[in-house]
């Protein structure tokens, strides 16, 4: 009798697991990226036929961005590749905001472009600058990305990436909440759902607690989100 009960329970567990797998598979099929890419490709060619070059370029940029989004976000790519992904995101936002936002990039050391970092560090930082800085302040119009080499107290080289915006700024309490992984921060605008907390945790898990994000800000003036990363080739 006991053995029969065990067999029955195991069977029920297996059936539930199988059901869960099928439900997950069904969900994945609903958002199959190949279907999305094929649809975007069709829109691109329709735009080309009708001479709508602006639509064609935007669809191409969105397709590349989505393709990168569906790949492993813990994969390491070069800083140059990360900036290329960011360019597609910025191109789409530039059209959305009718050229209102000025995006500037400053690479202080061109050798850093070949350094490897985990992907999708920059796009969430720029996304945060747009939606929680620029969008909330009518006269705000600047987002600047700066990459430079610095040295820590032990004279070890580090990569410092700063994303600056002249938006609404943040209070000390807001900054503490954003960087605290135990706090829930609403992130409803995002393209990929990767907020600053997520970026912070991914950096620390991949490179150690000596690396990560910090934020300098003055309310109604500016915000700087700073990422400190190792320099790996």
Image: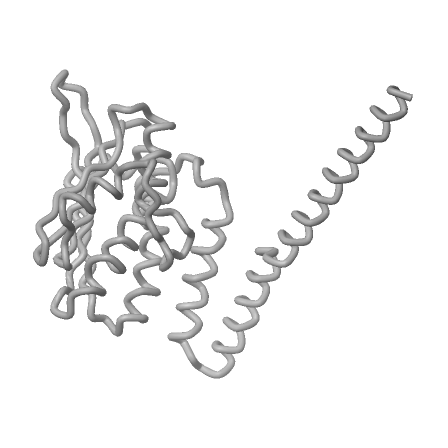
Tell me which residue sits at (14%, 43%) in the image: 172
Tell me which residue sits at (26%, 28%) in the image: 211
Vertical relation: 172 (above or below) 229: below
- Please tell me which residue lies in front, 54 or 99: 99
Q: Position of residue 17 (x, y in %)?
A: 72, 38
Tell me which residue sits at (70%, 43%) in the image: 21
- Please tell me which residue lies in front, 81 or 209: 209
Q: Farthest front residue?
A: 1
Vertical relation: 121 (above or below) 206: below
Left or right placement of residue 132 versus residue 205 in this view: left
Quarter where residue 141 is shown: bottom left
Q: Quadrant of the N terminus?
A: top right
Tell me which residue sits at (14%, 64%) in the image: 140
Vertical relation: 193 (above or below) 46: above
Q: Position of residue 155 (x, y in %)?
A: 13, 18
Quarter where residue 230 is shown: top left
Q: Farthest top residue?
A: 154
Q: Position of residue 192 (x, y in %)?
A: 42, 52
- Please tell me which residue lies in front, 204 or 48: 204
Left or right placement of residue 100 versus residue 25 in this view: left
Left or right placement of residue 4 versus residue 129 in this view: right
């Amino acid at each position: 009798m006991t053995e029969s009960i065990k067999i029955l329970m195991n069977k029920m567990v297996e059936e539930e697991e199988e059901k869960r797998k099928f439900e997950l598979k069904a969900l994945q099929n609903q958002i199959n990226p190949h279907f999305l890419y094929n649809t975007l490709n069709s829109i691109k060619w329709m735009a080309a036929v009708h001479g709508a070059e602006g639509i064609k370029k935007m669809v191409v940029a969105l397709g590349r961005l989505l393709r990168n989004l569906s790949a492993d976000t813990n994969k390491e790519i070069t800083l140059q590749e990360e900036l290329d992904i960011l360019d597609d995101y910025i191109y789409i936002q530039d059209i959305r905001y009718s050229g209102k936002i000025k995006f500037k990039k400053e690479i202080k050391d061109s050798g850093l472009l070949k350094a490897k970092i985990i992907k999708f560090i920059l796009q969430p930082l720029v996304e945060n600058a747009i939606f929680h800085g620029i969008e909330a302040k009518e006269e705000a119009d600047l987002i600047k990305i700066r990459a430079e080499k610095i040295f820590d107290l032990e004279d070890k080289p580090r990569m410092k990436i700063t994303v600056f915006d002249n938006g609404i700024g943040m209070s000390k309490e807001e900054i503490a909440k954003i960087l605290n992984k135990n706090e829930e921060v609403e992130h409803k605008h995002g393209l990929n759902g990767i907020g600053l907390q997520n970026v912070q945790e991914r950096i620390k898990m991949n490179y150690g607690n000596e690396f990560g994000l910090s934020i300098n800000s003055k309310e109604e003036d500016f915000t700087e989100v700073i990422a400190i990363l190792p320099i790996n080739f």
